[in-house]
Amino acid sequence: MGAFIVMEGIDGAGKSTQARLLAKWFEDKGYEVILTKEPTDTAFGKLIRRLVLTGGKEGIIDGSRISHEAEALLFAADRAEHVAKLIKPSLEAGKIVISDRYFYSSLAYQWARGLDLEWLIDLNRFAVRPDIVILLDLPVKESMKRINGRSIKSEFDKIAELQRRVRENYLKLAERFPEMRIVNALASVEDIHNDIVALVEHELFKD
Ligand SMILES: Nc1ncnc2c1ncn2[C@@H]1O[C@H](COP(=O)(O)OP(=O)(O)OP(=O)(O)O)[C@@H](O)[C@H]1O
Ligand SMILES: Cc1cn([C@H]2C[C@H](O)[C@@H](COP(=O)(O)O)O2)c(=O)[nH]c1=O
């Protein structure tokens, strides 16, 4: 049985923690698991980290900020490679694929940057749909505590405001995409893992 599971949520929501625990849960049951993430570790992902996600100099190229459209296209190019080279072949080989972020991140974040949601959905139409998307929902105040050391102090308010818009967007997307399931990410790591396992068992092993 191949299955595709995605973890989504604002920065610091606990996606990588929960993705790791879920991967171990499947491995303990004898499944072959591919644990992956976006942006990827390929040349495209590295380009994104260099051009878009570079701390204080975020998105600056030749002295000016790259456009949000260019950002969205870079994320989509990275995803196209991810789908073609890793996700599709792994699913076809019957593996469990768990991805920390996927196209829902583009919808939530690039929409929050002011891009048109329908354009973003069209741009990402090539992306194979997951069986289940776990949306780890966390109040921004808690996420800012968890990612505290990572951001520059003067940028704190700007980042918190973006995270607020992104969280709202995710909750709106969950009403539109039936594969999205909201999980309360304010609980303990263990309780969240148990909630995710219950959802996965219900969705993937229901027959
Ligand atoms: N349920 C939890 N309660 C308290 N702290 C947590 C919980 N889950 C994760 N953390 C801690 O919060 C921080 C962020 O967690 P993690 O890296 O898993 O989040 P993330 O969503 O993958 O973040 P990002 O999107 O920024 O990469 C880590 O220090 C982690 O140990
Ligand atoms: C895939 C994807 C990601 N982003 C943003 C979201 C986060 O702020 C960073 C990735 O950081 P992480 O610590 O590796 O999770 O990139 C985005 O804006 N659009 C996307 O499609």
Image (cartoon, rainbow, N blue to C red):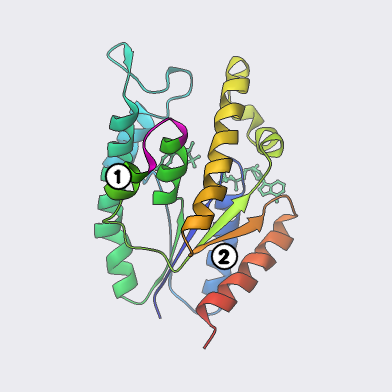
Quadrant where the N terminus is found in the figure = bottom left
Q: Using the rendered view, name the quadrant where residue 127 is placed.
A: bottom left
- Indicate left or right for 82 with 157 as reference: left
Q: Which mark is residue 76?
A: 1
Q: Where is residue 39 in the image (x, y as percent from the top left)?
A: 39, 43
Q: Where is residue 78 in the image (x, y as percent from the top left)?
A: 29, 45
Q: Which amino acid does label 1 sit on?
A: Ala
Q: Mark 2 points at which residue?
A: 22
* Residue at (29% x, 65% y) in the render: 88
Query: What secondary structure characterizes most of the magenta part?
Result: loop
Looking at this view, name the residue that lies furthest to the top: 63
145 w.r.t. 117: above or below: above
Q: Which amino acid does label 2 sit on?
A: Leu
119 w.r.t. 85: above or below: above
Q: Nearer the viewer, residue 150 or 6?
A: 6
Camera-side mark, 2 or 1: 1
Indicate yes or no whether the magenta region holds residue 114.
yes
State how far apart marks 2 and 1 are (Cα). Answer: 26 Å
Ligand 2's quadrant? top left
